[in-house]
Image: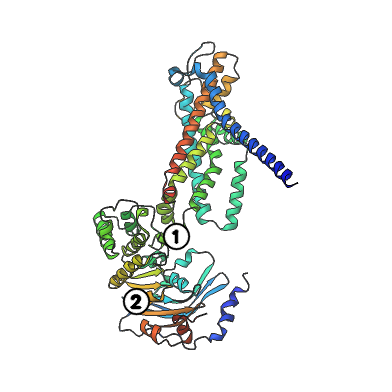
Amino acid sequence: MATPQPQQPQTVNEPLTAPETKPAPPKTGSQCKLTARDINFFYGQFQALYGISLDIPANKVTAFIGPSGCGKSTFLRTMNRMNETLRNTRVEGDLKLDGQDLLGMDVTDVRRRVGMVFQKSNPFPKTIFDNVAYGLRVNGIKKSSVVAEAVERSLSHAALWTEVKDKLHKPASALSGGQQQRLCIARALAVEPEVLLLDEPCSALDPIATLKIEELLFQIKDITTIVIVTHNMQQAARLADFTGFFLLGKLIEIDDTKKIFQNPGKKETEDYVTGRFG
Amino acid sequence: MMMEISATRRIVNGFMLTLSGVCTVLVVSVLFFILGYLLLHGASSLNWDFFTKLPKPSGETGGGMANAIVGSGKVLLMATVIGVPIGFMAGVYLAEYSGKTFAFAIRYVVDLLNGVPSIVIGIVAYALVVRPMRHFSALAGGTALGIMMIPIAVRTTEEFLRAVPTNIREGAMALGATKATTIFTVVIPAAISGLTSGMMLNLARVAGETAPLLFTALGNQFWSSGWLAPIATLPVMIYNYATAPEDDLHQQAWAAGFVLLTLVLIINVTARLIIASGPAAQRR
């Protein structure tokens, strides 16, 4: 079971011919928030990421697409070092946040600056207010007027304020699935992260709830940089300024979303976005 | 032929149903039988005096067990103070920090500790507390019962913390909480109703222990002041009175048995009510 795994990506990948040139960082006018160079990632012996290099531009939405198990979530979780909570994992390469070495920083600092929203909404078993206030409190902001203000601001950004302002002290578990996910976004926004990572945030939601989240993501890119992993290509096409395509632990291509979907540079990308991937 | 087989099957089936049903009724009725029997024999002693008066000197009738009721409370409180924090923190370590192999080893040792006979734990408490201090005490009794509470406290804590979903922990850590902060502000609050009721069941389990108290708390015919003097407890009182020659004392022993059992039942029912109303139950 464990031994054939390391070879698997190599052998399956052979006919694809690994890209000779590193995927070019998106050409943007704006500055880069995050830069990754030659990121390799290992779960024990199994290599899940192969030499990922890319730039995440500030105040834009960058989407990662690709089939299940291609490493897009693993890469996302490398950017806030969430993978460190798993035993027996290892990351190699160079990851910079605003030019600072992200892998060498204090991990709680990284996670405060790079927020994350998960696939399954995960409200704490606390009140709505305490959920949003949690990040502030653990980061030492205790003054109640400051906290209350931040809670209202975050819930407004997450397009949830009008729905919950009269029941802030009710348990978060009383909210609907879509509301819970927006609560998790509000919770992440409360600590004013510079980057917000979203790991398939809409995969458990109905189309209306999904639309609400897409709208709010579009609004908040003024205040943060967004990186979203999605299985839904229409979602990537609707939301993202840039889209990266992952396959078998490699970044095949990253470019303007329009270019990726209309005129991709690589055959594999074209096969995937046109649904001919097999 | 077919008919015969199915007839046999029906008879066997009916027999098994009856057998298991009768055994179930037996199991349920044992508790009520015990309660009724205790009440029957102890009723004449179950009066206001029993709860408010001290035991009468030998030879006189009447009196009560107020000191033993309070004493049992004090010893159990001491046991909780000693056993719960140690078991709880070890359970936190098992659930949240230790590696797989090490956890397996610890769990094994904890299960062995759970199997140590209570009289042996009494001897240990005697050697650890009574001998160095040169007298029996509530502290020694509490230590013995506290040690007995540790294994269940460890396993209860571990199980309820493990039941808290990983994604909640990740949510907290993704906001910049350290692992310890996550455990104490998110994981433990999420498991609090289970933990509380687990500890209460644990307490109810040791409340009736007699053997480890015989040579640690010893017993006392009077009020015991503080934590360092010999102290009366219900189980030891029952033991002493039941083996005494006087009929009046026998009746008091029955009454004490009834009170002790009722206390244990109340703790049990409360614990189960807490777990039924907890956040985990609401989410389901």
* Position of residue B105 in the picture relative to residue A32 (left or right): right
Question: Where residue B31 sits in the image (x, y, percent)?
Answer: 56, 30
Q: Give the image location of residue A146, x and y in percent.
A: 25, 58
**Residue at 36%, 58% in the rendered image:** A176
Q: Quadrant of residue A234?
A: bottom left
* Coloring applied to the structure: rainbow
As drawn, A5 above or below A130: below
Q: Residues within 10 Å of mark 1 (few under 14, many from 20)?
A: some
Residue B156 visible in this rendered orientation of the protein: yes
**Dot 2: few (<14), some (14–19), or many (≥20) neighbours within 10 Å?**
few
Residue B103 x/y as whole percent: 57, 54
Q: To which quarter of the image does residue A119 belong?
A: bottom left
Q: Which residue is mark 1?
A: B167
From where the camera sits, is residue B227 visible? Answer: no
Amino acid carrying label 2: it is Arg
Q: Chain of mark 1?
A: B
Q: Are marks 1 and 2 in contact (CB under 8 Å)?
A: no
Residue behind mark 2: A238
- Marked residue chain, label 2: A
Q: Is residue B153 above or below residue A173?
A: above
Cα separation, mark 1 vs mark 2, equals: 28 Å
> Disc 1 vs disc 2: which is toward the camera?
2
